[in-house]
């Protein structure tokens, strides 16, 4: 049996100051870049589809990388994977700031996401090592979730301000510098926490055979994919189509994240009342309502602040109801292999969102609400049918 390595002597606030920067950076690298997405085809001399691929590659790599770096952290330790990931993230960010050609830029986004996947795996593995079966673990996870709720709200605003003041390259310089500071802090203060003799034995087949795993993982994919399609299309609709400034776009975009934050405040009582299947069902129904409102806005050419952003507020509520319960629903049968199940849950979700979400954005008019309508409504119906069969 692996023996815990009790070397972590930090209070909860100190542990959060040490770990949270890595969790936030992994998400910030996606959101802070959004205000300059419409300008990137001209800057890089490429097509909008390849620029969209820089978002997709990041999301897919972030998910798949967890399958790769999880076993590496068990074999070589949390600390080397964390520090290596921080170095890779920082180096790729600085390379992105210096880039001017499309394919090297895409490669650097892949490397940046690989670094983000490494630090995420090491961070969450450390939480499991130190706080397993302790109430502090639940506190840290909930605080991580609260912090990450603010990233989609503040990231685009920060990106717009940085780009307006210093230019688009400064966005990636800032990301690189933040990763360097977080890595230096971790290098000085982050001890190795891997239990002695830990060996990860991956066993994915029983998980993949579980109808519950697929139902709730698809529910999570519906929620996260809706937001992915929203931030993939919003810059084209609001900046290029409606003439919003980068800052105006960021403020409008952030309102959806604010709705999610407010809904999260009340989600616990609703989940307690409805239960896990009931919460997922209501989340999917709310996605359908929001998709219908967005379709009406598109059909009748309603100004996008009303016809696109406000329906997204409705969908944001459904996303919170769904994502509040999907992990518990998907992983309930796998307490004896929770690590493998968690890695697969996030990996499947990232692949599904990245591939299917991108397909909707590319195949349907990306400067309209139709990709969002089709993804949110289609996925909600699939999940509702899966729930009905259980």
Image (tube, rainbow, N blue to C red):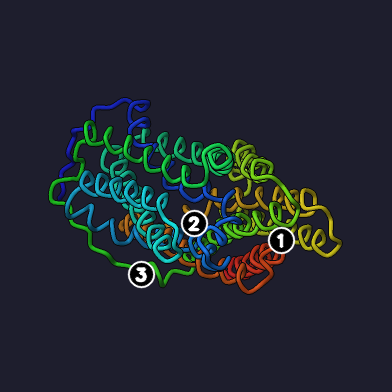
Residue 277 visible in the snapshot: no
Left or right of 126 in this view: 249: right
What crowding class fits label 3: few (fewer than 14 Cα within 10 Å), some (14-19), or many (20 or more)? Answer: few
Image: 118 above or below 255:
below
Q: Is residue 379 above or below residue 257?
A: below
The residue to which callout 3 is attached is 206
Which dot, 1 or 2, sits closer to the camera?
1
At numbered mark 2, what does the secondary structure look like: helix, strand or loop?
helix
Label 2 CA crowd tier, 10 Å (few <14, some 14–19, many 20+):
some
Which of the two labelled residues, at mark 1 and mark 2, occupies the earlier sequence position? 1
At which x and y percent is residue 119?
Answer: 32, 47
Residue 182 % position (x, y): 33, 36
Where disc 3 sits, the SS reads: helix
N-term-proximal mark, 1 vs 3: 3
Q: CA distance from mark 1 to mark 2?
A: 21 Å
Q: Residue at x 57, y 55 (%)?
A: 37
Q: Residues within 10 Å of mark 1 (few under 14, many from 20)?
A: many
Residue at (60, 66) in percent of width and height: 383
Q: Which residue is mark 1?
A: 288
The numbered mark, 2 or 3, whose residue comes first in the sequence reads 3
Q: Position of residue 223 (x, y in %)?
A: 58, 56
Q: Which residue is mark 2?
A: 329
């Amino acid at each position: 049996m692996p023996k815990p390595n009790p070397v972590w002597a930090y209070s909860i606030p100190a542990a959060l100051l040490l770990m949270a920067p890595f969790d936030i950076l992994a998400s910030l690298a996606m959101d802070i870049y959004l205000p300059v997405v419409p300008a990137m085809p001209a800057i890089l001399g490429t097509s909008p589809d390849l620029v969209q691929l820089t978002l997709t590659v990041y999301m897919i790599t972030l998910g798949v990388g967890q399958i790769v770096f999880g076993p590496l952290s068990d074999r070589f330790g949390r600390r080397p994977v964390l520090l290596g990931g921080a170095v890779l993230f920082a180096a790729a960010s600085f390379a992105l700031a210096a880039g001017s050609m499309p394919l090297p830029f895409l490669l650097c986004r892949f490397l940046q996401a690989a670094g983000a996947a490494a630090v995420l795996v090491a961070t969450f593995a450390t939480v499991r090592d130190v706080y397993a079966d302790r109430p502090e673990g639940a506190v840290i996870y909930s605080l991580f979730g609260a912090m990450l709720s603010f990233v989609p709200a503040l990231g685009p605003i920060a990106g717009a301000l940085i780009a307006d003041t210093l230019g688009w390259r400064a966005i990636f310089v800032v990301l690189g510098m933040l990763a360097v500071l977080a890595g230096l802090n971790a290098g000085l203060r982050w001890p190795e926490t891997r239990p002695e003799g830990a060996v990860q034995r991956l066993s994915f087949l029983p998980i993949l055979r579980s109808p519950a795993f697929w139902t709730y993982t698809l529910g999570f994919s519906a929620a996260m994919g809706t937001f992915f399609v929203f931030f993939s299309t919003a810059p084209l609709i609001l900046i290029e189509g409606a003439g919003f400034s980068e800052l105006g776009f960021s403020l409008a975009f952030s309102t959806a994240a604010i709705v999610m934050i407010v809904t999260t405040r009340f989600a616990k009582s609703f989940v307690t009342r409805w239960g896990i299947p009931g919460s997922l069902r209501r989340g999917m129904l709310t996605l359908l309502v929001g998709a219908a409102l967005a379709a009406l806005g598109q059909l009748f050419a309603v100004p996008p602040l009303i016809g696109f952003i406000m329906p997204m507020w409705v969908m944001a509520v459904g996303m919170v109801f769904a994502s509040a319960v999907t992990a518990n629903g998907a992983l309930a049968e796998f307490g004896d292999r929770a690590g493998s199940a968690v890695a697969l849950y996030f990996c499947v979700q990232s692949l599904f969102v990245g591939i299917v979400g991108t397909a909707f954005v590319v195949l349907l008019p990306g400067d309209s609400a139709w990709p969002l309508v089709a993804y949110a409504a289609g996925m909600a119906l699939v999940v509702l049918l899966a729930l009905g069969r259980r």
